[in-house]
Image (spheres, grey):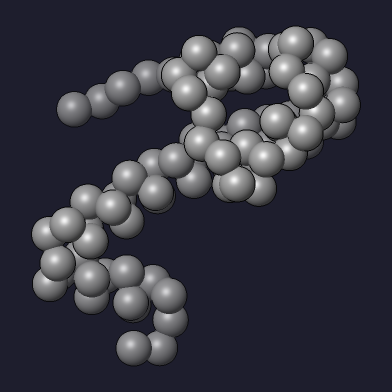
Amino acid sequence: MRTWKDYKEHVKAVDVEGKSIIEEMEGIADIVGTIVSKRNEMGISQRESAHKTGLSQSTIARIESFKITPNIDTLLILLKSLGLKLKIYS
């Protein structure tokens, strides 16, 4: 296997539990990546985001660096502060 993507695809093909874990993490990464991109696009610092949301700057930094996964309430607060909405597809 040459790349991380190759490895992920291999695990997804041979390990049902591994596939589920990888897909869950990819979903979280997509959401957090969108939050970071939108915040940067709007020119808002983590400190300013903290002020707008009532969260601490360190909490925002930990979420954005994947050190913690936000609960749904925190996620909705972050999304709303950036004018984003959560949509769920099946």
Decide if residue 50 is in sight here: yes
Q: Quadrant of residue 89?
A: top left
Residue at 32 percent of width and 56 percent of height: 22
Q: Is residue 42 visible?
A: no
Say left or right for 84 vs 3. right
Image position of 29 (left or right of 13): right
Quadrant in the rendering for residue 35: top right
Q: Is residue 17 left or right of residue 8?
A: left
For the point 43% across and 75% down, the residue is 4
Taking the spot 56% from the left edge, 40% from the top edge, the residue there is 68
Q: Toward the viewer: 51 or 59?
A: 59
Expressed as whole percent of the image width and height from the top left, the position of residue 10 reads: 23, 75
Is 82 in front, or is 72?
72
Among all residues in the image, which is located at the extreme bottom? 1
Quadrant showing the C terminus: top left
Percent coordinates x, y for residue 25 in the rendering: 39, 49
- Is 11 located above or below residue 32 in the figure? below
Image spot of residue 16 (x, y percent): 12, 59
In the image, residue 55 sits, relative to residue 40, either above or below, namely: above
Q: Which quarter of the figure has residue 48?
A: top right
Numbered marks: total: 0
Measured as percent of width and height from the top left, residue 1 is found at 34, 88
